[in-house]
Amino acid sequence: MLRTINFMGVRNVAFGVTVLLTVLALFSWFHKGLNYGLDFTGGTLIELTYEKPADVTKVRTQLNEAGYHEAIVQSFGATTDLLVRMPGEDPQLGHQVAEALLKVGGDNPASVKRVEFVGPQVGEELRDQGGLGMLMALAGIMVYLAFRFQWKFGVGAIVSLIHDVIVTVGILAYFQITFDLTVLAAVLAIIGYSLNDTIVVFDRVRENFRVLRKATLIENINISTTQTLLRTMATSISTLLAIAALMIFGGDNLWGFSLALFIGVLAGTYSSIYIANVVLIWLNLNSEDLIPPVATDKEVDDRP
C-alpha cells in the first residue's frame, strides 16, 4: 500500500512561494512588458527561397550588416526556404531585403517568394481577441466545474489556472521572449492541460468523501493527491520530454511555443496540488457540499 504523503503539511510554505512567484511575474509583466511579435504589433513578413540550403546565421549576419538590425530570420519548410520578419510598413521592404541579400549572396542568391504586411490595427485586434478568448475560456471552465462538481471546485480550478497563466507570461516577459500567436496558443493549451490535471485530483477528492467518511478535508486531500501522484508524474514527465524535444530540435519557429508549454506544464503540475487543493481548504469544503439538495414536499407533489 502506498504511504500517504502529507502534501498539505507544507501548504503555508507553498503559499508563500506561490505569492512570491506571482508578485515577481506580475512585476515583470507590467514593468518590462511583453515583447509582442509582428502578429500583434504589425510589420512585414518575407519568405525567401535559395537555390541551395540556406545558412540562417549567415543570413542574419548579412541583414545586420545591411542595416536591418531588427530582422528575425527563421527556417521555414525546406532547407532552401527562410522566413524573415521585421517591423516596417513599406510595401517594397521585401524586395529591398532581397536586393540587399543578392548583393552579398555570392553563389547562393535569394528570390522573394511572398511578402505579407500585417498592419498595427490588425495586430491590436488579434491581441484583444486573444485576451478575450482566454477570459471566455476561463469563464466557461468555471461554469462547467460548478455544474460538474461544485462551485468551490470551480473557484479552486480558476485560481490555479490564473496562477499558471501569470507565471508563464511573467517569465516570458522577464526574458523578453517574442509573444506571438503561437505563444498565445501555447498559453491556451496550458489552461487545458492544467485543468485536466486539476480535475483528476478533484474527482478523487470527491470520491473519497464517500469512502473516507471519518477523514478530515486535509486528510482526504493528502490521500487523494497521493493516489493520483503516479498518474500526475507519468503525464507531466512524458509531456515535458516531448516538449523538450521540440525545444531542442524544433528550431526558432517553435522555441517560444515550446518554452511557454514547458513553463506552463511545470506550473500546472504544482498548482493542481498546492493551489487548487489549498483553495478547497480555505473555502472549507465538506461532504454536505456534495450532497444533492433534497426535494421539498411541494416539489414532489408538482412532479408529473
Image (cartoon, rainbow, N blue to C red):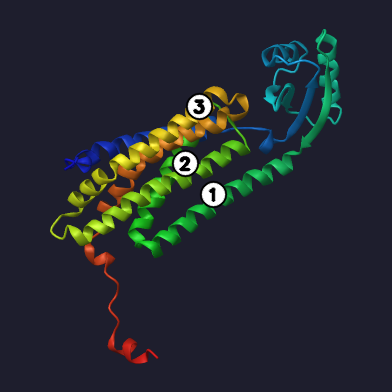
Question: On the rendered image, what quadrant is the N terminus found in?
Answer: top left
Rendered residue at 57%/36% (across/down): 183
Q: Earlier in the sequence, mark 2 or mark 1?
A: 1
Could you give the CA–CA distance between mark 3 and mark 1, rounded to whole angstroms? 27 Å
Between 224 and 142, which is closer to the camera in this rendering?
Answer: 224
Q: Amino acid at mark 2?
A: Val
Left or right: 60 in relation to 2: right
The percent position of residue 301, horizontal first and vertical second, equals 33, 92
Residue 14, by quadrant, is top left
Left or right: 196 in relation to 122: left
Question: Residue tagged by mark 1?
Answer: 134
Report helix, strand or loop for mark 3: helix
Whether residues under marks 2 and 1 lie with C-beta atoms below 8 angstroms apart, the answer is: yes
Could you give the CA–CA distance between mark 3 and mark 2, rounded to whole angstroms? 23 Å
Q: Earlier in the sequence, mark 3 or mark 1?
A: 1
Question: Residue tagged by mark 3?
Answer: 245
Question: Residue tagged by mark 2?
Answer: 165
Rendered residue at 23%/56% (across/down): 208
User: Is 163 above or below relative to 205?
Assistant: above
| 10 Å crowding of disc 1: few (<14), some (14-19), many (20+) | some
User: Is 91 above or below relative to 122?
Assistant: above
Rendered residue at 76%/39% (across/down): 119
Whether residues under marks 3 and 1 lie with C-beta atoms below 8 angstroms apart, the answer is: no
Visible residue check, residue 283: no
Between 238 and 29, which is closer to the camera in this rendering?
Answer: 238
- Count of numbered badges drawn on the protein: 3
Between 51 and 266, which is closer to the camera in this rendering?
Answer: 51
Residue 56, by quadrant, is top right
Between 257 and 138, which is closer to the camera in this rendering?
Answer: 257
In this view, the residue farthest toward the left is 214
